[in-house]
Image (tube, rainbow, N blue to C red):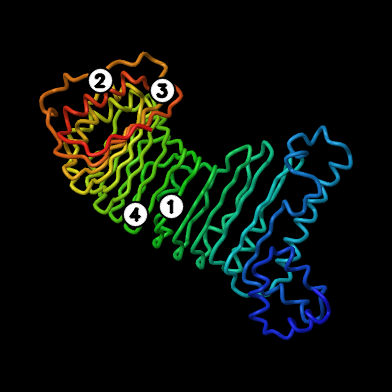
């Protein structure tokens, strides 16, 4: 930017300049203070803080950090200096920033092997600026657990909170109290949530509409909310029997590894979109089907034969799926040998338009589907617009089995509009 451009830009109002700087990273915004006296303090009132530790690296994190002990002296010093520069900027910025409300704070931080006592205490200072959004990504780490400050869970202005901690040791989220009255959306990744977390959380977050937990260890047994609309549990491990009761929930997406017990759904009268994938070999009970009766789209993946058996035991609780238009069922290939569960789902879905079958890989011998299913499921659905069979698993279904599946479907469906094999 030449002198003429600087002078003309400097005549713009503060609100315009801060809006322009909000499109830069915080490091870039601070550097504008050298342009002229007019710019010296503009960065201090920018409503968005975007600080990325990787921008301070003069050597690649992935090249040197993991093998730090084997790095040359220059490499080690460069990594150490990157940490020093990052912490210096954080401290200086928070010390000098104007005490105005913050719209968004976004920070990416890498913890190196040598940082045995790495701290993220600056999160508390950010929370004091009353931000609307906080988005934190922390990677790397040592064998020590990360100590996450509590104040971020008592920020009354906060509407959006995303904390992803890809560290060696999962961080236990155990705040003394939770008071987030304005929070609408929470996403947590790679953390451990203890038995008392859910109770504190749903009491302290009365406005929460969207909850997303990714790759988390869950030790609590209840998710109950009168306002939650979207619940996503991706690649989470569940260590307790869990009950989910959310009468205003619209969307439910779960990929769960059940370690000790099952899962049950109740009070799901508004549920429309459902995607459930379950794994686990020691599951005493499931109570799912009764809570899915209002779904318009149901995707159901059963990862083990034990879970399939338990889900079939849940069939007596199954209601009529009057709203169901699309059904996707996946599982071990023996689900295509024994149509018991699929047949019941068809029977209870009078308005179904589309059926999709997704076999999961199986190394066992594939048998022709059974047709001697009990009389109470021998019925015929009048019409399906589309039936799709996806044959993309590692152990592909033979053409003989696919033909047998199509033949078996003919027992339950009078007319199929389109049969698609992909």
Question: In what quadrant of the picture does the N terminus appear?
Answer: bottom right
Give the numbered dot on residue 369. 2
Closer to the chain start, of discs 4 and 1, is: 1
Give the numbered dot on residue 211. 1
Closer to the chain start, of discs 4 and 2, is: 4
Q: Is residue 92 above or below residue 269?
A: below
Circles 4 and 2 in contact, beta carbons < 8 Å: no
Closest to the observer, 343 or 219: 343
Mark 3 highlights which residue? 396
Circles 1 and 3 in contact, beta carbons < 8 Å: no
Q: Residues within 10 Å of mark 1 (few under 14, many from 20)?
A: some
Closer to the chain start, of discs 2 and 3, is: 2
Q: Is residue 382 above or below residue 40?
A: above
Q: Is residue 116 above or below residue 33?
A: above
Closest to the observer, 375 or 290: 375
Where's residue 254, x and y in %? Answer: 39, 41
| Distance between the alpha carbons at the discs numbered 4 and 1 | 11 Å
| Distance between the alpha carbons at the discs numbered 2 and 3 | 16 Å
| Distance between the alpha carbons at the discs numbered 4 and 2 | 42 Å
Which is in the foreground here, disc 1 or disc 2? Answer: 2
Badge 1 marks a residue whose secondary structure is strand
Q: Left or right? Give the position of 227 relative to 290.
A: right
Mark 4 highlights which residue? 225
Which is in the foreground here, disc 1 or disc 3? Answer: 3
């Amino acid at each position: 930017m030449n002198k003429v451009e600087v002078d003309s830009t400097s005549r713009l109002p503060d609100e315009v300049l801060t809006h322009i700087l909000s499109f830069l990273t915080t490091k870039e915004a601070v550097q504008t203070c050298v342009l002229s006296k007019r710019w010296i303090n503009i960065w201090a009132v920018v409503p968005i803080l975007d600080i990325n530790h990787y921008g301070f690296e003069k050597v690649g994190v992935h090249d040197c950090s993991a093998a730090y002990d084997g790095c040359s002296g220059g490499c080690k010093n460069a990594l150490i200096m990157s940490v020093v520069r990052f912490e210096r900027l954080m401290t200086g910025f928070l010390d000098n920033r104007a005490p105005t409300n913050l719209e968004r704070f976004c920070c990416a931080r890498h913890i190196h092997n040598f940082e045995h006592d790495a701290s993220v205490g600056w999160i508390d200072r950010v929370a004091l600026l009353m931000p609307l959004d906080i988005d934190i990504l922390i990677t790397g780490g040592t064998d020590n657990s990360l100590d996450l400050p509590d104040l971020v869970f008592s920020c009354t202005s906060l509407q959006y909170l995303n904390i992803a901690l890809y560290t060696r040791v999962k961080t236990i989220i155990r705040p003394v109290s939770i008071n987030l009255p304005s929070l609408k959306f929470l996403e947590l990744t790679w953390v451990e949530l203890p038995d008392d977390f859910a109770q504190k959380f749903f009491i302290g977050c009365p406005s929460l509409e969207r909850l997303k937990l990714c790759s988390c260890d869950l030790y609590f047994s209840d998710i109950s909310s009168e306002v939650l609309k979207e619940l996503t549990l991706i690649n989470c491990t569940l260590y307790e029997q869990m009950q989910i009761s959310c009468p205003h929930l619209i969307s439910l997406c779960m990929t769960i590894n059940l370690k000790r017990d099952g899962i049950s759904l109740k009070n799901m009268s508004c549920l429309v979109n459902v995607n459930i994938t379950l794994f686990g070999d020691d599951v005493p009970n499931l109570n799912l089907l009764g809570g899915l009766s209002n779904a318009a789209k149901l995707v159901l993946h059963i990862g083990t034969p034990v879970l399939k058996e338990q889900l079939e035991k849940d069939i007596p609780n199954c209601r009529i799926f009057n709203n169901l238009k699309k059904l996707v069922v996946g599982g071990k290939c023996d689900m295509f040998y024994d149509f018991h569960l699929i047949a019941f789902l068809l029977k209870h879905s009078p308005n179904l338009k589309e059926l999709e079958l997704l076999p999961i890989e199986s190394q066992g011998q594939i048998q022709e589907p059974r047709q001697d299913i009990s009389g109470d499921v021998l019925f015929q659905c009048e019409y399906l617009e589309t039936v799709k069979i996806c044959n993309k698993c590692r152990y592909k279904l033979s053409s003989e089995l696919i033909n047998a599946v199509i033949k078996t479907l003919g027992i339950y469906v009078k007319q199929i509009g389109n049969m698609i094999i992909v």
